[in-house]
Image (spheres, grey):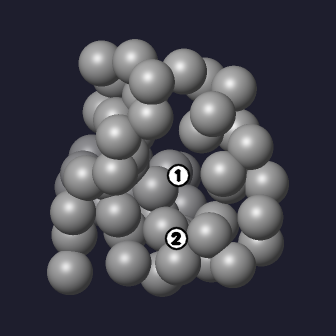
């Protein structure tokens, strides 16, 4: 399930993501994260693969 987790500051986000279990959960679930009003999307997919498939 994709959902949004909110962080007030970049430092708060970095501190939370530095814990291995939290980072793994985010990447496995492709969870969206909001940091100071900016929404980040995390995924295991390679950016290059996405660009190549979109160019076809």
Residue at image position (62%, 70%) is 22
Where residue 34 sits, quadrant-wise, is top left
Q: Give the position of the C terminus as an image quadrant.
A: bottom left
Residue at image position (53%, 51%) is 48
Crowd tier of the residue under label 2, counting other residues whose Cα lies within 10 Å: few below 14, some 14–19, many 20 or above: some
Residue 12: image location, x then y, percent = 63, 33
Compared across the picture, whether 29 is left or right of 20 comes to left
Q: Which residue was labeled with disc 1?
A: 48
Residue at image position (40%, 18%) is 36
The numbered mark, 1 or 2, whose residue comes first in the sequence reads 2
Q: Nearer the viewer, mark 1 or mark 2?
A: 2
**In this orientation, which residue lies closer to the viewer: 22 or 55?**
22
Total labels drawn: 2
Q: Which residue was labeled with disc 2?
A: 27
Residue at image position (66%, 51%) is 16
Residue 3: image location, x then y, percent = 21, 63
Residue 33: image location, x then y, percent = 37, 45
Q: Is residue 48 visible?
A: yes
């Amino acid at each position: 399930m994709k959902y949004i987790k909110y962080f007030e500051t970049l430092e708060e986000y970095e501190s939370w993501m530095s814990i291995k279990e939290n980072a793994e959960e985010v990447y496995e679930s492709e969870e969206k994260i909001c940091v100071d009003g900016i929404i980040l999307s995390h995924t295991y997919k390679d950016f290059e693969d996405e660009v190549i498939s979109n160019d076809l």
